[in-house]
Amino acid sequence: MQINFFDPNAPKKSTNLSINSDLLRQAKEHRINMSQALELRLAELLREEKIRCWKEENREAIEDYNRRIEAHGAFSDGMRRF
């Protein structure tokens, strides 16, 4: 299941970009939709950054949880069959 962290139905907005001319030429030759490619890659980068931020914001709680499990085990340890 994928959760959108941005509004995929938001209106498009024109912008000016400067990119490597050879990349532009090759993208056009291969009929790559540059707007779509940029949106997909930006979404990937933003998702990675939001994950990184969440991990940093929750680092202390994650470390506490891991220490507790290391010291006392998980609730289901006695139920495992593996």
Image: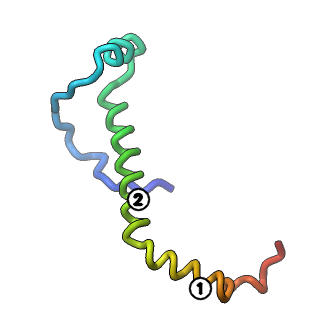
Give the residue drawn at x 42%, y 57%: 3
Position of the C terminus by quadrant: bottom right
Q: Residues within 10 Å of mark 2 (few under 14, many from 20)?
A: few
Where does residue 74 sit, x and y in percent of width and height?
Answer: 67, 83
Number of callouts in the render?
Answer: 2
Give the residue drawn at x 38%, y 38%: 41
Q: Residues within 10 Å of mark 1 (few under 14, many from 20)?
A: few
Amino acid at pointer 2 = Arg
| Mark linked to residue 1 | none
CB-based contact (under 8 Å), mark 1 and mark 2:
no
Question: Badge 1 is on which residue?
Answer: 68
- 74, above or below 36, in the image: below
Task: Indicate which disc, 1 or 2, sits on the residue closer to the N terminus.
Answer: 2
Q: Classify mark 2: helix, strand or loop.
A: helix
Amino acid at pointer 1 = Arg
- 22, above or below 72, in the image: above
Where does residue 42 sit, x and y in percent of width and height?
Answer: 34, 41
* Drawn side of residue 7 relative to residue 66, left or right: left
Give the residue drawn at x 33%, y 12%: 25
* Drawn side of residue 63 relative to residue 7, left or right: right
Task: Give whichever of 43, 18 is nearer the camera.
Answer: 18
Tell me the distance, in whole angstroms, between the alpha carbons under discs 1 and 2: 23 Å
Question: Badge 2 is on which residue?
Answer: 52
Task: Give whichever of 30, 19 is nearer the camera.
Answer: 19
Where does residue 17 sit, x and y in percent of width and height?
Answer: 20, 28
- 4, above or below 11, in the image: below
Give the residue drawn at x 31%, y 46%: 8
Q: Quadrant of residue 65?
A: bottom right
* Drawn side of residue 79 relative to residue 24, left or right: right
Q: Classify mark 1: helix, strand or loop.
A: helix
